[in-house]
Amino acid sequence: MPTRFRCWAMLTRLLILGCLLAAPPHGKATEDMFDLREIIASPTPQQYSVCLDHSCATIVTDALSDNEWREVTAPLRPPPGGAADERAAIGRSMALFETVVGRHTGTSGDRGRNAAGFGQPGQLDCIDESTNTTTYLKLLDGDGLLRYHRVAERATRFGLFVGMPHSTAVIEDLDSGSRYVVDSWFYDNGQPPHIVRLKDWYAGQDPVDD
């Protein structure tokens, strides 16, 4: 195979397999997505933004009915017994958010990672996933449903030993100060996200390692 074709083949594989930080609107690839005026920085159940089509190429405004809000918040309604219980409940709530919002936005068929659903309608990359998950976490926090955590800024990892650039939502334990990723990108729509310590995630931790 000529060198130029080998290079193109390698580039194509990287684009498919990695969660690349392709520049979203206005070129804010590595900055806080909530600086974009199209994304509602202080969301409410009646008005919040959803990113889709890879790197927030499309941003839509969505709303939850009262019944849907009760549905997605049900895991956090019984007071959790501590921070670990709350993180587990957050995971279940994020799965419900994805299920309900998926019906609204046509993203129900989103597949985990990038390769399985590459190029398919409704497929989300890690920019979309981390931004949407942060929005859902803000909705929970705004309703006083996060008792042991606060919503932190999104995080991005990249480097020789952790693969292609990859972004995630983050929460912080109010008592210990430890930060945890809430990473929905690894799994299909409607599945609980990967929740591990941020420091382990930075080191390249992946669900396949568990």
Image: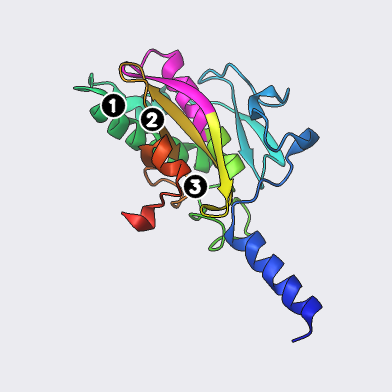
Tell me the quarter of the picture where residue 2 sits: bottom right
Look at mark 3 in the image and give the residue it sits on: 185
For the residue pair 166 and 158, the one nearer the viewer reads as: 158
Tags 1 and 3 touching, CB below 8 Å: no
Look at mark 2 in the image and give the residue it sits on: 72
Between disc 2 and disc 3, whose residue precedes? 2
The kind of residue on which mark 3 rests is: Trp
Q: In screen coordinates, is 132 left or right of 12?
A: left
For marks 2 and 3, give the CA distance: 19 Å
For marks 1 and 2, give the CA distance: 14 Å
In the rendered image, the vertical position of residue 192 relative to residue 170, given as above or below: below
Residue at 29 percent across and 31 percent down: it is 89
> Mark 2 or mark 3: which is in front?
3
For the N terminus, the quadrant is bottom right
Q: Does dot 2 land on a helix, a strand or a loop? A: helix
Residue 181 in the magenta stretch? The answer is: no
Tell me the quarter of the picture where residue 12 sits: bottom right
Between disc 1 and disc 2, whose residue precedes? 2
For marks 1 and 3, give the CA distance: 20 Å
Look at mark 1 in the image and give the residue it sits on: 86
Q: In screen coordinates, is 121 left or right of 78?
A: right
Which span of residues is magenta-colored?
Answer: 133-153
